[in-house]
Image (spheres, rainbow, N blue to C red):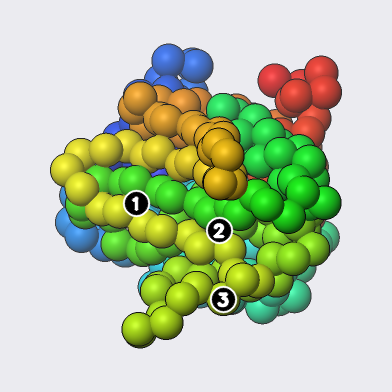
Amino acid sequence: MNVAIVGYGRMGREVESVLLERGHGVKIRIDVMGNGDTEVLSRKTLAGADGIIEFALAENILKRIDIYAELGIPALIGTTGWDKLREAAKNAYRIARGPIMHGNNFSVGAHIFFRLCGHAASLINNVNEYDTALIEYHHGKKADYPSGTALSAADIILAQIKRKTQVLTELPANSPIPEDALQVASIRIGAAPGTHEMRMDSAADFITISHQALSLGGFALGAVRALEWLEGRRGWFEVETYINALLEGGKQ
C-alpha cells in the first residue's frame, strides 16, 4: 500500500518506520504544524494514496473524515480527544464508500489490558470492600487528558461494576470522592510513552493490573496491521472488531 500519513509527530514517524518495515510505501506526510511534506489536507494532496493513517490534532476532524469517506480508500484514525463527536461522524459517514476504523489505542497489549480490567471488575462487582481507580501516565507534551485509552478502560470497568456509575477526572473541591465514582487520574511527566494501571484497593490488600508501553512501536505496529485488515472491507469499524479477529485467530 502507498499510505498517506496525517500527523507527522512522534507517532507519525513511528508509523512510517513500521510501514517501510512491512513493505509499504509513504505517499505523503501531511502535518498542520509544518513537520511533513505539506500542511494542507485535501482530495488533491491525498490523490494516489491507497490508504490513510491519522494520528493528528482533533481540530477539524469531521471535515477530514468527510474527505476520507469520499475518497473511498481505507482510513485508520488514531487521533484522540474527540470522543463526543464520534457518533456525529458515524452518522454522517456513507457506508457504501471505503472503510474507516477508529480507535483510541491500537496496541495489542493495551487491548489485552482492557480484557483483564473487565474480568477483574466483574470479579469484584459483588465484593464491596474493594474500591477501584485508574491512573495513567504520559509524556508532558500530550495535549489531552485523560487519555483515550484510560477512558476506554473506564467504560469497560463501569460496565462490570454496578456500584460505579460515573467517571471522575478531577477531584471535587473540599469534599470526598462520591462512592459511585470511578476516579481516572492523569499524570503528565517527562517522556513517558504511556502507562495505565487499574488499582483495586481494600483494607486488607490491593491488586493492580498495569500496561506499560516501552515505546511507540506497539501502537504503530497495531495501526499498520489494522489498516492492512481494512483492505477489501466497507463501513465504519471500531478497533475492537479488528482486535477480536486478531486475538481469536483471524487475519493478522
The answer to which of 12 and 219 lies nearer the viewer is 219
The answer to which of 96 and 12 lies nearer the viewer is 12
Q: Which residue is mark 1?
A: 7
Identify residue type, mark 3: Pro
* Separation (CA) of disc 1 from disc 3: 39 Å
What kind of element bears circle 1?
A: loop
Q: Which residue is mark 3?
A: 178
**For the residues carrying marks 1 and 2, which lies nearer the camera in this image?**
2
Tell me the quarter of the picture where residue 175 sits: bottom left
Task: Classify mark 3: residues with Cα within 10 Å, few (<14), some (14-19) or many (20+).
Answer: few
Tell me the quarter of the picture where residue 105 sits: top right
Task: Kindly identify which numbered label has been placed on residue 151.
Answer: 2
Say if mark 2 contacts mark 3, CB within 8 Å.
no
Identify residue type, mark 2: Leu
Identify residue type, mark 1: Gly
Q: Mark 2 or 3 closer to N-term?
A: 2
**For the residues carrying marks 1 and 3, which lies nearer the camera in this image?**
3
Task: Classify mark 2: residues with Cα within 10 Å, few (<14), some (14-19) or many (20+).
Answer: some
